[in-house]
Amino acid sequence: MSKGGFMKDALILFAITLVAGACLGGVYEITKDPIAAANQAAKERAFREVLADADSFAMDDYSAALDKVNTEVKELDFGNVSVDECATGMDASGAAIGYVVTATSKDGYGGDVTVSVGITTDGEVKGIEFLTLNETAGLGMNASKPEWKGQFADKKVEQFSVTKSGSTSDEEIDAISGATITSNAVTNAVNTALYFVNNCVAQ
């Protein structure tokens, strides 16, 4: 191929790349706001699911508490987990009645497991809802079924543990059959959220 032919092909390839990049950039600009809005709506639905008694939610500044928990959790036996954010749930008068804590475990079988946990100001877990769950269909994905995630609801404990032999107390969570890794990842995320409220949030 002549030098001129090579340059022509290179320029054509450059032009195609430039146009494709511009198109992708345009698609991103068009879709980023709807995606962000959909994610926010999903988050708000999760808040209302896990702390149904709250009249409204406020994203208060918990940065110091988040730094504290994400430092201290490394010394706990909860695996690779962190607290991402916290919202305060308030009643109609504006008084705090609880918190919705978003925690992520990176120890899921299929990747990150992110869960919103509703916890009252006195430390009772009201419920959990998944924001991210990419586990195996028919196994780990069963964590999203009401009968499994409902095991955490309306329990006031220091922390939960996973059992394979049948739950005999509020602290015990029955493992999902064939998905102990998922069961532990979810439980550790919930435990981290509990630790955050009980030890890092000023009461």
Image (tube, rainbow, N blue to C red):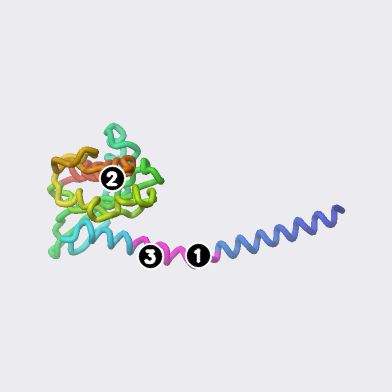
Q: x, y (%) of residue 162?
A: 24, 39
Helix, strand or loop at disc 3?
helix
* Residue 148 higher or lower than 55, as above or below: above
Q: Give yes or no for residue 192 being in the magenta stretch.
A: no
Measure how far apart labels 2 and 1 are at the Cα level: 41 Å
Q: x, y (%) of residue 174?
A: 22, 43
Tell whether label 2 touches label 3 (CB within 8 Å).
no
Left-right relation of 101 to 126? right
Q: Name the residue under label 1.
A: 29
Helix, strand or loop at disc 2?
loop
Left-right relation of 147 to 14? left
71 or 73, which lies in front?
73
Helix, strand or loop at disc 1?
helix
Tell whether label 1 touches label 2 (CB within 8 Å).
no
Mark yes or no: residue 176 visible.
Answer: yes
Q: Earlier in the sequence, mark 2 or mark 1?
A: 1
Q: Nearer the viewer, mark 3 or mark 2?
A: 2
- Quadrant housing residue 10: bottom right
Span colored in magenta: 26-40
Q: What residue type is labelled 2?
A: Ile
Q: What residue type is labelled 3?
A: Ala
Tell whether label 1 touches label 3 (CB within 8 Å).
no
Q: Name the residue under label 3.
A: 37
Mark yes or no: residue 199 visible.
Answer: no
Instruction: Sort mark 3 into few (<14), some (14-19) or many (20+) by Cα contacts within 10 Å.
Output: few
At x 87%, y 53%, the residue is 2
Measure how far apart labels 3 and 2 are at the Cα level: 33 Å
What's the mark number on residue 176? 2
- Quadrant housing residue 65: top left
